[in-house]
Image (cartoon, rainbow, N blue to C red):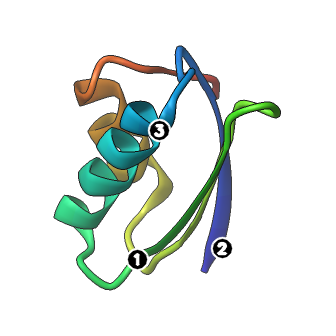
Amino acid sequence: MQQQFHVEGMSCEHCVRAVTRAVQQVDAQAAVQVDLKAATVTVNSTQPRPRIAEAIREEGYSVAP
């Protein structure tokens, strides 16, 4: 299932790697696309939205509801 998150605080490729790694720790098969300019993260995963959002928050980023 494809889900999109508005994530604040991302500004560089390190952020892209950190967010991608966080999501893939929850679901190793997840496809993750990060758009720095739009501040969005699109995730294709079977995991529930709250679990993915929490993984991103644990990396230090703000996830809008």
**Amino acid marked by disc 1:** Ala
Answer with mark 3 or mark 2, whichever residue precedes in sequence.
2
Can you name the residue that lies furthest to the front here?
13
Near-viewer residue (32 or 54):
32
Can you name the residue that lies furthest to the right here?
38
- Residue 31, x across and y down, in percent: 49, 76
Q: Which mark is residue 63?
A: none
| Image quadrant assignment for residue 27 | bottom left
Residue at left offset 23%, top offset 78%: 28
Q: CA distance from mark 3 to mark 2?
A: 22 Å
Q: Secondary structure at mark 2?
A: strand
* Of marks 3 and 2, the one in the foreground: 3
- Residue 32, x across and y down, in percent: 51, 65
Q: Would you place residue 17 above or below residue 61 in this image?
A: below
Q: CA distance from mark 3 to mark 1?
A: 19 Å
| Image quadrant assignment for residue 38 | top right
Q: CA distance from mark 2 to mark 1?
A: 10 Å
Residue named by callout 2: 2
Residue named by callout 3: 13
Q: Would you place residue 3 above or below residue 4 in this image?
A: below
The crowd level at tag 1 (other Cα within 10 Å; few <14, some 14-19, many 20+) is some
Tell me the quarter of the image containing the C terminus. top right
Residue at left offset 26%, top offset 54%: 21
**Amino acid marked by disc 2:** Gln
Q: Secondary structure at mark 1?
A: loop
Answer with mark 3 or mark 1, whichever residue precedes in sequence.
3
Residue named by callout 1: 30
Q: Secondary structure at mark 3?
A: helix
Asked if the residues shown at circle 3 and circle 1 are in contact, with their CB atoms under 8 angstroms apart, the answer is no
Tell me the quarter of the image containing the N terminus. bottom right
